[in-house]
Image (cartoon, rainbow, N blue to C red):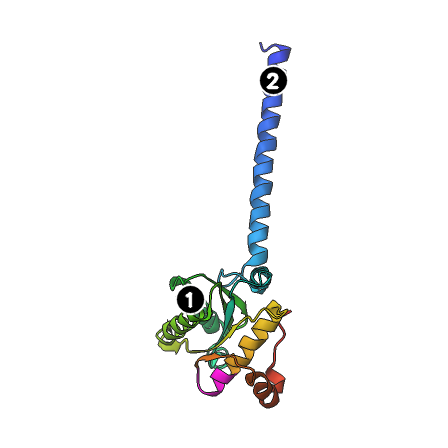
Amino acid sequence: MLSASTALLAVTTASCLALLARNAKLHAELASARHDADHDPLTGLPNRRALLRHLDALLADHARPVAVTLIDLNRFKDINDEHGHTAGDFVLCQVADTLTALDLWRAKVGRMGGDEFLIITDDGMQTARTNAEAAAQALDATTVALGATTFGCYASLGLAIADHNDMTAVDLIHRADAAMYAAKRRGGGVKEWHPNIGATITTTRPMQRRRYR
């Protein structure tokens, strides 16, 4: 027969083990919740919230060169309209896989939402150009087969580099957005932002401007 002290020790040990198991479960749930809050549920890439936070942190160091490339898929709406959102989701996942597989130098890749992706390059313009061109070429060569139908992943890319003149993440992405529309108007590929792009695009495409806050 167990003594009172032995029984108490057994009960205490069981309680401690249960508490440790409960704590481990809570930590796992917290880690999962944090991951879900910062990642896109469809593609698994960092989401808009995580991208903006990362970009703001980089821009806080005014001595650090930072550039962004905004990627917008061409004719994606046509794919959804003609073949359904399942086809569109397959395309988005393939784009995410293609961009991730590139393992771009000093870059963070994420999905802003819809058919828009973002590459944040923590380096100078030459690296940003190389990353943007690599992404454009990889997407041009990427196709998705769904049944008897094959979809291309062609895209328009807008590239902008921070000048650190009190620039925020939203400001920089707006520049890349303007450059992306200029690329889309010429049929795709990569277009770099310059001071005259914003006025031209705002005048010609006023209803298609987006907000990134």
Residue at image point 56% right, 77% down: 175
Q: Callout 1, which amino acid?
A: Leu
The location of residue 47, given as percent across then percent down, is: 55, 63
Query: Distance of mark 1 from mark 2, alpha carbons?
Result: 56 Å
Instruction: Choose the circle earlier in sequence order: 1 or 2.
Output: 2
Would you name the residue on which mark 1 appears?
99
Query: Image height check: is 38 above or below 3?
Result: below
Q: Is residue 186 magenta?
A: yes
The location of residue 189, given as percent across then percent down, is: 42, 80
Residue contact between numbered discs 1 and 2, judged by CB atoms under 8 Å: no
Would you name the residue on which mark 2 appears?
9
Residue 146 appears in the figure: no
Give the camera-side residue of 115 and 170. 170
Q: Callout 2, which amino acid?
A: Leu
Residues packed near mark 1 inside 10 Å, few (<14), some (14 to 19) or many (20 plus): many
Toward the bottom, the furthest residue is 204
Question: Mark 1: which secondary structure?
Answer: helix
Residue at image point 43% right, 72% down: 129
Q: Is residue 9 left or right of residue 77?
A: right
Toward the front, the furthest residue is 63
Which stretch is magenta?
Answer: 182-188
Give the camera-side residue of 50 and 122. 122
Q: Is residue 107 left or right of residue 204?
A: left
Question: Mark 2: which secondary structure?
Answer: helix
Q: Quadrant of the N terminus?
A: top right
Residue 204 appears in the figure: yes
